[in-house]
Amino acid sequence: MANCCSTSSKPVQEYPNKHRCPVNEKSYRSVSPSTILHHINEPWNWQNKEQGYYFCEDPDCEVVYFGEDDSVINKSSLRTEVGIKESNSQALICYCFGVSKEKSTSQAIKDFVVQNTKEKTCACSARNPSGRCCLKDFN
Ligand SMILES: [Zn+2]
């Protein structure tokens, strides 16, 4: 019986690894549709097409997810606040352990996250809107 809370996400290999955000025209890495389902508003209304999806990490771009067909999902269509796109110091950087931008400057907290990442007790693919480990977003 598979663990329904497993953090392993299927690699998105049948599609290009990178695609350009149609708004800022910079290239970003792919994200699993299951990650999008965990953050989009009313996921039951989202049409997951057979294509690659990507995460725009530019703080100044309204787009969070976009598809190979250049369809976009903006910040306003998510139920999760994307910390790296907010100037608010209370916005989350680490969604697995609830670390805000402000708290991410603490070495002790960073060490805690590093340790738990090593032990794989994190759940980035579901909880972080980027679907990836948050450590690169720590100062
Ligand atoms: Zn963008």
Image (cartoon, grey):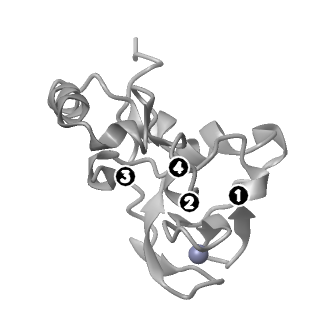
Q: Amino acid at mark 2?
A: Lys
The residue at which mark 4 appears reads as: 83
Where, by quadrant of the figure, is residue 102 drawn? top left
Mark 2 neighbour density, 10 Å: few (under 14) some (14–19) many (20 or more)? some
Disc ID at residue 117: none
Disc ID at residue 11: 3
Give the foreground label among 4 and 3. 4
Contact between marks 2 and 3 (CB within 8 A): the answer is no
Q: Amino acid at mark 1?
A: Lys
Mark 1 vs mark 4, CA separation in Å? 11 Å
The residue at which mark 1 appears reads as: 75
Contact between marks 1 and 2 (CB within 8 A): the answer is yes
Q: Is residue 56 left or right of residue 117?
A: right
- Looking at the image, residue 119 lies above or below residue 15: above
Whole-percent x and y of residue 135?
27, 46
Task: Residue lying at the far top in this picture: please name it.
Answer: 1
Across the whole image, how many numbered discs are drawn on residues?
4
Q: For the residue labelled by badge 1, is the local secondary structure a helix, a strand or a loop?
A: helix
Residue at 70 percent of width and 54 percent of height: 48
- Looking at the image, residue 135 lies above or below residue 111: below
Mark 1 vs mark 2, CA separation in Å? 9 Å
